[in-house]
Amino acid sequence: MLLEISDVLDKNKLENIRAMLDKVTYVDGKLTAGQAAQRVKNNQEMQHGSKQAEFLDHLVMSSLAEHAAFRSGALPYRVAQPVLARYTPGMQYGDHIDDPIMGTGPHKFRTDVSVTVFLNDPDEYQGGELIINTTFGDKAVKLPAGSAVMYPSTSVHRVTEVTQGERIVAVVWLQSMVRDAAKRELLYQLDQARNTLLNTKPQAEETKQVDRSYVNLVRMWSEV
Ligand code: NI
Protein backbone atom coordinates (compact mmCIF):
# COMPACT_ATOMS: atom_id res chain seq x y z
CA MET A 1 0.00 0.00 0.00
CA LEU A 2 1.20 3.41 -0.94
CA LEU A 3 -0.30 5.91 1.46
CA GLU A 4 -0.11 9.69 1.17
CA ILE A 5 -0.43 11.49 4.49
CA SER A 6 -1.18 15.21 4.50
CA ASP A 7 -0.36 17.71 7.23
CA VAL A 8 2.31 15.77 9.07
CA LEU A 9 4.00 19.12 9.75
CA ASP A 10 1.95 22.29 10.22
CA LYS A 11 3.01 25.77 9.07
CA ASN A 12 4.67 26.62 12.35
CA LYS A 13 6.80 23.50 12.40
CA LEU A 14 7.73 23.94 8.74
CA GLU A 15 8.91 27.48 9.40
CA ASN A 16 11.03 26.26 12.29
CA ILE A 17 12.50 23.55 10.10
CA ARG A 18 13.24 25.93 7.24
CA ALA A 19 15.07 28.30 9.57
CA MET A 20 17.13 25.42 10.94
CA LEU A 21 17.95 23.96 7.51
CA ASP A 22 20.26 26.86 6.70
CA LYS A 23 22.42 25.99 9.69
CA VAL A 24 23.00 22.27 9.14
CA THR A 25 25.99 20.62 7.49
CA TYR A 26 25.47 18.23 4.59
CA VAL A 27 27.70 15.31 3.63
CA ASP A 28 27.78 13.00 0.59
CA GLY A 29 24.78 10.63 0.73
CA LYS A 30 26.88 7.72 -0.58
CA LEU A 31 28.35 7.38 2.95
CA THR A 32 25.13 5.80 4.23
CA ALA A 33 24.22 3.74 1.16
CA GLY A 34 24.53 -0.04 0.87
CA GLN A 35 26.83 -1.46 -1.82
CA ALA A 36 24.29 -1.64 -4.63
CA ALA A 37 22.64 1.67 -3.78
CA GLN A 38 26.00 3.50 -3.68
CA ARG A 39 26.34 3.17 -7.42
CA VAL A 40 23.08 4.97 -8.13
CA LYS A 41 22.91 7.40 -5.20
CA ASN A 42 23.79 11.02 -5.78
CA ASN A 43 22.49 13.35 -3.07
CA GLN A 44 23.52 14.97 0.19
CA GLU A 45 22.50 14.15 3.73
CA MET A 46 22.49 16.14 6.91
CA GLN A 47 25.32 15.28 9.25
CA HIS A 48 24.05 14.04 12.61
CA GLY A 49 25.51 15.17 15.91
CA SER A 50 24.69 18.87 15.98
CA LYS A 51 21.98 20.53 18.08
CA GLN A 52 20.19 21.61 14.90
CA ALA A 53 20.19 18.04 13.57
CA GLU A 54 18.81 16.74 16.86
CA PHE A 55 16.06 19.35 16.82
CA LEU A 56 15.07 18.47 13.25
CA ASP A 57 15.07 14.72 13.97
CA HIS A 58 12.86 15.22 16.98
CA LEU A 59 10.42 17.52 15.21
CA VAL A 60 9.92 15.17 12.27
CA MET A 61 9.68 12.01 14.37
CA SER A 62 7.32 13.38 17.00
CA SER A 63 5.03 14.82 14.32
CA LEU A 64 4.86 11.50 12.50
CA ALA A 65 4.32 9.56 15.70
CA GLU A 66 1.35 11.78 16.61
CA HIS A 67 -0.31 11.39 13.20
CA ALA A 68 -3.25 8.99 13.27
CA ALA A 69 -2.95 7.93 9.61
CA PHE A 70 0.76 7.18 10.04
CA ARG A 71 0.13 5.07 13.14
CA SER A 72 -2.75 3.20 11.54
CA GLY A 73 -0.96 2.57 8.23
CA ALA A 74 2.48 1.68 9.59
CA LEU A 75 1.74 0.13 13.00
CA PRO A 76 5.27 1.14 14.02
CA TYR A 77 7.34 -0.99 16.36
CA ARG A 78 10.89 0.31 15.96
CA VAL A 79 11.65 3.56 14.18
CA ALA A 80 15.05 4.78 12.98
CA GLN A 81 16.52 8.24 13.27
CA PRO A 82 15.38 10.09 10.13
CA VAL A 83 17.76 11.00 7.32
CA LEU A 84 17.39 14.50 5.97
CA ALA A 85 18.35 14.55 2.30
CA ARG A 86 18.98 17.37 -0.12
CA TYR A 87 19.06 17.22 -3.91
CA THR A 88 20.50 20.16 -5.83
CA PRO A 89 20.58 20.44 -9.66
CA GLY A 90 22.14 17.36 -11.26
CA MET A 91 21.42 15.11 -8.26
CA GLN A 92 19.22 12.02 -8.38
CA TYR A 93 18.87 8.56 -6.85
CA GLY A 94 18.53 5.69 -9.34
CA ASP A 95 16.42 2.52 -8.95
CA HIS A 96 17.13 0.78 -5.62
CA ILE A 97 15.54 -0.90 -2.63
CA ASP A 98 16.36 0.23 0.90
CA ASP A 99 18.62 -1.81 3.21
CA PRO A 100 16.76 -4.69 4.90
CA ILE A 101 18.34 -4.20 8.32
CA MET A 102 19.27 -0.87 9.87
CA GLY A 103 20.66 0.28 13.20
CA THR A 104 23.50 -1.28 15.16
CA GLY A 105 23.85 -3.71 18.07
CA PRO A 106 20.70 -3.96 20.19
CA HIS A 107 19.12 -1.18 18.11
CA LYS A 108 19.07 -3.28 14.95
CA PHE A 109 15.70 -3.49 13.24
CA ARG A 110 14.12 -4.79 10.06
CA THR A 111 12.86 -2.18 7.61
CA ASP A 112 9.23 -2.87 6.66
CA VAL A 113 8.02 0.63 5.83
CA SER A 114 9.78 3.58 4.18
CA VAL A 115 8.46 7.11 4.64
CA THR A 116 9.41 10.30 2.80
CA VAL A 117 8.37 13.60 4.40
CA PHE A 118 8.50 16.54 1.98
CA LEU A 119 10.07 19.62 3.58
CA ASN A 120 9.70 22.09 0.72
CA ASP A 121 7.02 22.76 -1.86
CA PRO A 122 6.89 21.17 -5.35
CA ASP A 123 7.14 24.56 -7.07
CA GLU A 124 10.54 25.18 -5.42
CA TYR A 125 12.27 22.63 -7.68
CA GLN A 126 12.02 21.05 -11.10
CA GLY A 127 12.24 17.26 -11.36
CA GLY A 128 12.90 15.39 -8.12
CA GLU A 129 9.84 13.12 -8.34
CA LEU A 130 9.87 10.06 -6.13
CA ILE A 131 8.92 7.18 -8.42
CA ILE A 132 7.69 4.09 -6.61
CA ASN A 133 7.27 0.82 -8.44
CA THR A 134 3.94 -0.76 -7.41
CA THR A 135 2.02 -3.80 -8.65
CA PHE A 136 -0.12 -1.31 -10.59
CA GLY A 137 2.88 0.31 -12.29
CA ASP A 138 5.13 3.24 -11.46
CA LYS A 139 3.66 5.95 -9.28
CA ALA A 140 5.22 9.44 -9.24
CA VAL A 141 4.97 11.32 -5.96
CA LYS A 142 5.78 14.98 -5.34
CA LEU A 143 3.82 16.37 -2.40
CA PRO A 144 3.37 19.75 -0.70
CA ALA A 145 5.71 20.70 2.13
CA GLY A 146 4.61 18.98 5.34
CA SER A 147 3.04 15.95 3.61
CA ALA A 148 4.45 12.44 3.54
CA VAL A 149 4.24 9.23 1.56
CA MET A 150 4.57 5.77 3.05
CA TYR A 151 5.30 2.57 1.11
CA PRO A 152 6.58 -0.97 1.74
CA SER A 153 10.39 -1.04 1.96
CA THR A 154 10.39 -3.97 -0.48
CA SER A 155 9.40 -1.57 -3.32
CA VAL A 156 11.90 -0.53 -5.98
CA HIS A 157 11.99 3.27 -6.10
CA ARG A 158 14.02 6.18 -7.43
CA VAL A 159 14.25 9.96 -7.35
CA THR A 160 14.45 11.65 -10.75
CA GLU A 161 17.10 14.26 -11.41
CA VAL A 162 16.53 17.69 -9.94
CA THR A 163 17.14 20.20 -12.74
CA GLN A 164 16.39 23.41 -10.89
CA GLY A 165 16.07 24.52 -7.26
CA GLU A 166 16.46 22.23 -4.26
CA ARG A 167 14.51 19.20 -3.07
CA ILE A 168 14.60 18.66 0.68
CA VAL A 169 13.03 15.63 2.34
CA ALA A 170 13.25 13.64 5.54
CA VAL A 171 13.33 9.87 5.06
CA VAL A 172 12.30 7.49 7.82
CA TRP A 173 12.41 3.68 8.02
CA LEU A 174 10.63 1.54 10.51
CA GLN A 175 9.92 -1.97 11.60
CA SER A 176 6.20 -2.59 11.79
CA MET A 177 4.47 -4.75 14.38
CA VAL A 178 2.90 -6.43 11.33
CA ARG A 179 5.53 -7.62 8.87
CA ASP A 180 3.25 -8.49 5.95
CA ALA A 181 2.32 -5.45 3.82
CA ALA A 182 -0.96 -7.07 2.69
CA LYS A 183 -2.01 -7.60 6.31
CA ARG A 184 -1.09 -4.00 7.16
CA GLU A 185 -3.27 -2.81 4.30
CA LEU A 186 -6.26 -4.85 5.50
CA LEU A 187 -5.81 -3.53 9.03
CA TYR A 188 -5.59 0.02 7.74
CA GLN A 189 -8.85 -0.34 5.81
CA LEU A 190 -10.63 -2.01 8.70
CA ASP A 191 -9.39 0.74 11.02
CA GLN A 192 -10.88 3.36 8.68
CA ALA A 193 -14.30 1.65 8.88
CA ARG A 194 -13.91 1.23 12.62
CA ASN A 195 -13.20 4.95 13.14
CA THR A 196 -16.19 5.95 11.04
CA LEU A 197 -18.44 3.63 13.05
CA LEU A 198 -16.99 4.80 16.37
CA ASN A 199 -17.78 8.39 15.36
CA THR A 200 -21.21 7.86 13.84
CA LYS A 201 -22.68 4.94 15.79
CA PRO A 202 -20.65 4.63 18.99
CA GLN A 203 -23.27 2.51 20.78
CA ALA A 204 -24.21 0.17 17.93
CA GLU A 205 -23.60 -3.56 18.19
CA GLU A 206 -21.86 -3.63 14.78
CA THR A 207 -19.48 -0.93 15.97
CA LYS A 208 -18.46 -3.09 18.90
CA GLN A 209 -18.03 -6.11 16.63
CA VAL A 210 -15.84 -4.26 14.12
CA ASP A 211 -13.84 -2.61 16.92
CA ARG A 212 -13.19 -5.93 18.68
CA SER A 213 -12.33 -7.70 15.44
CA TYR A 214 -9.78 -4.99 14.62
CA VAL A 215 -8.20 -5.14 18.06
CA ASN A 216 -8.02 -8.93 17.99
CA LEU A 217 -6.58 -8.99 14.46
CA VAL A 218 -3.81 -6.60 15.56
CA ARG A 219 -3.17 -9.00 18.46
CA MET A 220 -3.18 -12.04 16.15
CA TRP A 221 -0.82 -10.56 13.55
CA SER A 222 1.59 -8.50 15.69
CA GLU A 223 5.12 -9.55 16.59
CA VAL A 224 6.54 -7.46 19.42
NI1 NI B 1 15.42 4.60 -0.91
Image (cartoon, rainbow, N blue to C red):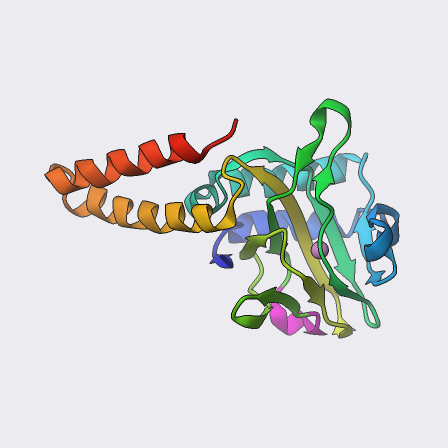
Q: Which residues are magenta?
A: 121-128
Q: Quadrant of ligand 1?
A: bottom right
Residue 85 lies in quadrant: bottom right
Q: Position of residue 219 (x, y in %)?
A: 39, 30
Instruction: Tell me how many marks there are.
Output: 0
Give percent across and percent down for residue 203: 12, 37
Q: Is residue 50 magenta?
A: no
| Rendered view: 42 above or below 162 | above
Q: Does residue 214 appear to the left or right of 91 in the view shown?
A: left
Identified at 60% across, 44% down, the residue is 112
The residue most toward the top is 106
35 left or right, relative to 157: right
Report the residue at 32% width, 33% height from top: 215
Looking at the image, is 188 positioned above or below residue 110? below
Is 109 or 198 nearer to us in this picture? 109
Residue at (19%, 37%) from the top-left corner? 209
Where residue 8 sits: x, y (%)? 51, 50
Residue 190 location (% of width, % of height): 32, 47
Image height check: is 10 above or below 160?
Answer: above
- Above or below, comparing residue 81 to residue 124 in the picture: above
